[in-house]
Image: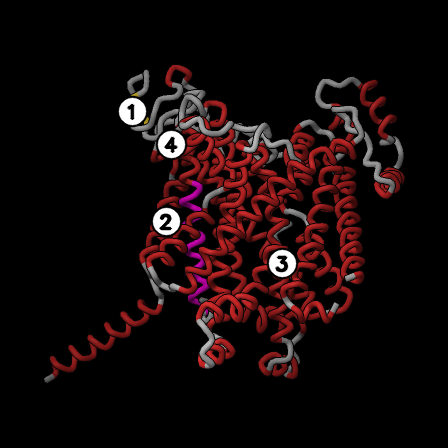
Amino acid sequence: MMVLFVRRLGQLAFVLLALTVLIFGLMHLSGDPVALMAGEGATLADIERVRERMGFDQPIYVQYARYMAGLVRGDLGTSVRQHRPVATLVLERVPATLQLTILAQLMAVVVAFPVGVVSAIWRNSVFDRAAMAAAVFAQAIPVFWFGIMLILVFSVGLRWTPVGGRTSALALVLPVITLSAVFVAQNARLIRSSLLEVLSLDFIRTARSKGVAERSVIFRHAMRNALIPVVTILGLQFSNLLSGAVVTEMVFAWPGLGRLLVQAVLGRDVPLVLGSTIMIAAVVVFINLIVDLLYGVIDPRVRSEA
Amino acid sequence: MAADVTIVSNTTRFGRLRRSIRDLKLTAPVVFSFAMLLLIVVLALFAPLFTRYEPNQIELRDRLTPPLTVDASGDFRLMGTDGLGRDVWTRVLYGARLSLLIGLSTVMIGGTLGLVLGLLAGYNGGIWEDIIMRGADIQIALPSMVLYIAILSVLGGGLLQVILILGFTGWVNYARVARAQVLAMRNQEFVLAARSLGASRSRVLVKHITPNMLAPIIVIASFDVAKNIVVAAALSFIGVGIPPDVPTWGGMLSEARDVLRLAWWPATLPGVALMLLVLSVNLIGDWVRDLLDPRLD
């Protein structure tokens, strides 16, 4: 437990180190970050003022050392456009992104689970074929296009839901459906194939020949084992879920971290780009820790190792 | 008598051919996918032959003409026109070129890089392996979209930038598979035989090990083509990828949002094209995987 926690913390440190080195290195290679931030039409005096204020007149390693020293203290610098601490701006956006991604993840499990299980039990039935065909389609639909289509039908056409923003509970419906669709499909296919594989194993035949009720065979004997690969994928999925969230937030003007990041990029706000990227990386590592702990609950073999 | 013999041998040859075709498991969805992909490739390659408009030709008089109708100038518009009066069908055709270019070039870069790094990690071990595999772990821990956006924020948007970023960050899966395959093959007899005959390290890797691991690499590559096409479209859609003066499917969808209340077609039709392309490539990927590895499913 403690070992796991320390290992994950080490992973976070590694990720942050690699990320900041990469961004600082690229910034250095790509020319003058200050000119980039000041934008077109800035005078030389403007540029020099920004340069001194941001500490960009220092050599790159001094800048990097300063940035990392700030990071350790929770200071991510100041936004060039919004003139507020990056840490505050970033933290404000975390709840919206977590709300969207966690609900989508929940939906991806709650919908996919029964579909996958029923498809496996009634293999090659009409339900199984229809569900798996739908899953193949859902996996091919680009997230952002699916979102636009939902807006077109339910917001513009039927006027049931708002077009965007985080105004009411109703405003959550379309973004969550948009984001989760691909993962519902992925998980349903995975749960089906995982359960089918376990159901073909010897200990299931043993259970059946002992006369264990079919319901018990599936839910007590097979399911627990079938869940192990599923939970592993769920952990890996969260990173992809956040990728999808960036795009979904842009479609629905959802005020989360992804939208903050894109706006920072479009506004050439380098400290904000770095800050929101680092925050997203931290969220991923934190969620992975939770998944690791969940893993121990399902698979006793992991618990004894840790 | 002689005639009989010919007939028999013909049927067996025909039977053999039929059996090998059956072994290919060409189901209806697979045939559909190949046909669709072929159609998209032909349309993209010969785009100018299938339209009389330029992709960036603005005709404000004809703006927002619905699909399958005649515009204000009296011309028929297959997919209608967008908010600036540009021909949607033409832009879809030219957008297909970019999508295919991005899908193929990024996978070639990522696949080659991943293969080389995976071979290096698997065969050499030691510090190389540590660095390469640790790098893979770090990259996987970060949401890919965030990584692309962060890098694009520094390099700026553009076709070349998008191809290079998707290409050079696309190495992880190939490297992992290549390394695992090398580890599995390193001490097999055919490798030991080659080495004992005095084959150099690079010869063993290139001539003996690589050809034996191409199957899983091809499977990953086919799914990556589809994935990278969608990611590039998403980057254009959110405004950090390829700039809007180049007709891309993602860029078209982004612009179509501004006229969503007035017109459904500029937002719908490029997306249908994107979905059909991704669906075909994915189904072909599934098919290749089933052919190469019958154990799955």
In the image, residue A101 above or below residue A192: above
Earlier along the polypeptide chain: callout 2 or callout 3?
Answer: 2
Q: How far apart are marks 2 and 4 (CA)?
A: 18 Å
Q: Distance between the residues labelled 4 and 1?
A: 13 Å
The amino acid pointed to by label 2 is Leu
- The mark lying in front, picked from 4 and 1, is 1
Q: Give the range drawn in magenta.
A: B274-293
Mark 1 closeness class: few <14, some 14–19, many ≥20 residues within 10 Å: some
Q: Do labels 3 and 1 share a chain?
A: yes
Find numbered disc 1 in the image and state the secondary structure of the residue it sits on: strand
Earlier along the polypeptide chain: callout 1 or callout 2?
Answer: 2
Earlier along the polypeptide chain: callout 4 or callout 1?
Answer: 1
Q: Mark 1 lies on which chain?
A: B
Q: Does the magenta stretch include residue B249?
A: no
Check residue B89 in the rendering and tell me which mark sits there, or answer none. 4
Identify which residue is drawn at 56% across, 68% down: A225
Earlier along the polypeptide chain: callout 4 or callout 3?
Answer: 4
Identify which residue is drawn at 78% across, 57% down: A5
What is the chief secondary structure element of the magenta stretch? helix
Q: Is residue B30 visible?
A: no
Of A129 and B178, nearer the camera is A129
Q: Mark 3 lies on which chain?
A: B
Q: Which chain carries label 4?
A: B
Mark 3 closeness class: few <14, some 14–19, many ≥20 residues within 10 Å: many
Quadrant where the N terminus of chain B is found in the figure:
bottom left
Please state the horizontal and vertical placement of residue B107, each as a whole percent of the image.
55, 52
Say whether residue B22 is left or right of residue A71.
left
The amino acid pointed to by label 4 is Trp
Q: Name the residue under label 1.
A: B69
Earlier along the polypeptide chain: callout 3 or callout 1?
Answer: 1
Q: How far apart are marks 1 and 2 (CA)?
A: 28 Å
